[in-house]
Image (cartoon, helix red, strand yellow):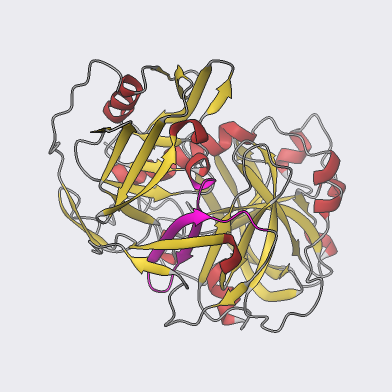
């Protein structure tokens, strides 16, 4: 049996692979977004900066980074559910097998022969996904992000893949979730490594950490705001701080650092997970819970739907007056604007309208969900798009709050000991997650709320 948190990575990657496997890059992606992002002007404080994120598919946002010297613009997606960076090679086995020729103008492939600073490490690189994998080699080279150069950056160059995204990936997770360190996705330290089981495991400074190493940010942190559904605006990610013009207040909650009870083997922080105490369905003056117990939840930018155990999905579907379809990966229910969902974290909650996180098709709404297959949950982009989210990898905290849709920009740089402006800790702030296999509440609904 795969441990529950191990399944988080598998399900997250499974959905991402499905969402982008049939994409072809054309139009605005290969044009405007083939250019490396640069500062339009020198800001007063260059220890905080933002990048635009262009939506290219449901739940998938990309930006362009420069790899090599001279820099080659390559489209990448930022992933809070992983910690490593990889890009595809222009002359790879995949390209040789492809019916469509691989072109540098697609901004998906790295030509190592054109870089004067490329240095192979002579070590295999591999990442295993739920439905596929990527394989290649580790290397060092320069990476440019908005006029800022990271020299000798460690990343994987992918030679061959199976059912994996066509974009490069930049993992923004904790260092102890790197493939050089993780054993069974960071849970069982005695089983085979997902990387090289014959080598000692180790961590290295990944993308967000290298930004601080080079002095480009003062704190290993970043924040994300996605555009409203249907908007022609882009998303934005801010490294080193926040844009205080883009949110009201933030709830600051701890990343789970260890677990007791049935998950006591999880004894160090490796995933960007927090404790989700409850979710309540609210209509008029009636509130009904759908979780039989608290769940660890992964805050994942490269998963689109909400992933939950089947019994949670069933409870929600019944209360919405709908039905879950595994084929559609959604709960179909009659559209209404008067049903709210309250997500409880540490003794307080964030509220969102059910219709706001659903796809509206006439009289029917579809709430994107997938079965996690075990006792964990994932909050993907369908949830995150309704909030402003801040990730603090130094102090092991995540903050979520209601966004302000403003064209104004007020970037604030944070130092290591600072917390976000207009933020407060959740009342029940605990870094330890007490897990039990058994439900605390017995929930058996038979009709809608």
Q: Please give the name of the residue rendered at 33% of the width and 31% of the height, measured from the top-left corner.
A: 284
On the image, the x and y values in percent for residue 429 come to 25, 64
Q: Nearer the viewer, residue 172 or 108?
A: 172
With respect to residue 224, does 293 lie above or below? above
With respect to residue 62, does 269 lie above or below? below
The quadrant holding residue 308 is: top left
User: Which quarter of the figure is the N terminus placed in?
Assistant: top left
User: Which quarter of the figure is the C terminus placed in?
Assistant: top left
On the image, the x and y values in percent for residue 44 come to 70, 84
With respect to residue 433, does 315 lie above or below? above
The quadrant holding residue 375 is: top left
Q: Please give the name of the residue rendered at 35% of the width and 22% of the height, measured from the top-left corner.
A: 317
Q: Please give the name of the residue rendered at 54% of the width and 15% of the height, measured from the top-left corner.
A: 363
The answer to whether 410 appears left or right of 281 in the picture is right
Part of the protein shown in magenta: 384-406
Q: Nearer the viewer, residue 190 or 326?
A: 326
Q: Can residue 353 be spotted in the picture?
A: yes
> Which residue sits furthest front?
285
The answer to whether 223 appears left or right of 399 in the picture is right
The answer to whether 165 appears left or right of 75 in the picture is left
The quadrant holding residue 26 is: top right
With respect to residue 131, does 167 lie above or below? below
Q: Please give the name of the residue rendered at 82% of the width and 41% of the height, measured from the top-left corner.
A: 102
Tell me if residue 387 is in the magenta stretch: yes
Tell me if residue 24 is in the magenta stretch: no
On the image, the x and y values in percent for residue 85 come to 59, 58
**Total numbered labels placed on residues in the image:** 0
Q: Nearer the viewer, residue 197 or 265?
A: 265
Q: Can residue 200 be spotted in the picture?
A: no
């Amino acid at each position: 049996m795969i441990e529950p948190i191990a399944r988080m990575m598998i399900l997250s990657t499974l959905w991402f692979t499905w969402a982008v496997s049939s994409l072809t890059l054309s139009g605005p992606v290969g044009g405007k977004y083939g250019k490396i992002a640069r500062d339009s002007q020198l800001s007063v404080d260059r220890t905080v900066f933002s990048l635009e994120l262009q939506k290219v598919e449901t739940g998938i946002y990309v930006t362009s980074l420069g790899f090599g010297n001279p820099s080659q613009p390559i489209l990448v997606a930022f992933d809070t559910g992983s910690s490593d960076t990889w890009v595809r090679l222009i002359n790879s086995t995949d390209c040789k097998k492809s019916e469509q020729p691989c072109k540098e103008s697609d901004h998906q492939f790295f030509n190592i022969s054109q870089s004067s600073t490329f240095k192979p490490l002579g070590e295999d690189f591999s990442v295993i996904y739920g439905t596929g994998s990527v394989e290649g080699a580790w290397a060092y080279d320069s990476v440019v992000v908005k006029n800022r150069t990271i020299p000798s950056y460690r990343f994987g160059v992918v030679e061959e893949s199976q059912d994996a995204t066509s974009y490069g990936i930049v993992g923004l997770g904790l260092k102890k979730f790197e493939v050089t360190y993780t054993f069974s996705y960071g849970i069982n330290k005695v089983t085979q490594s997902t990387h090289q089981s014959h080598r000692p495991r180790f961590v290295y400074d990944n993308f967000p950490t290298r930004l601080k190493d080079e002095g480009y940010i003062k704190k290993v942190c970043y924040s994300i705001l996605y555009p409203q559904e249907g908007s022609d605006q882009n998303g934005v990610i801010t490294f080193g701080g926040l844009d205080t013009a883009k949110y009201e207040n933030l709830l600051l909650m701890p990343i789970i650092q260890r677990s007791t009870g049935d998950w006591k083997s999880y004894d160090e922080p490796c995933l960007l997970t927090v404790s989700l105490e409850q979710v309540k369905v609210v209509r008029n003056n009636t509130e009904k819970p759908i979780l039989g117990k608290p769940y660890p939840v992964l805050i994942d930018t490269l998963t689109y739907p909400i992933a939950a155990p089947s019994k949670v999905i069933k409870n929600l579907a019944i209360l919405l007056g709908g039905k879950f379809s595994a084929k559609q990966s959604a709960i179909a229910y009659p559209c209404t604007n008067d049903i709210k969902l309250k997500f409880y974290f540490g003794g307080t909650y964030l509220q969102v309208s059910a219709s706001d996180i659903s796809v509206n098709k006439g009289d029917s709404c579809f709430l994107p969900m997938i079965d996690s297959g075990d006792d964990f949950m994932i909050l993907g982009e369908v949830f995150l798009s309704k909030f402003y989210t801040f990730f603090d990898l130094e102090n092991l905290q995540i903050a979520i709050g209601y966004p302000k849709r403003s064209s104004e920009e007020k970037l604030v740089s944070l130092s290591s000991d600072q917390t976000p402006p207009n933020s407060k800790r959740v009342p029940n702030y605990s870094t330890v997650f007490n897990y039990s296999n058994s439900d605390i509440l017995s929930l058996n609904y038979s009709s809608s709320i």
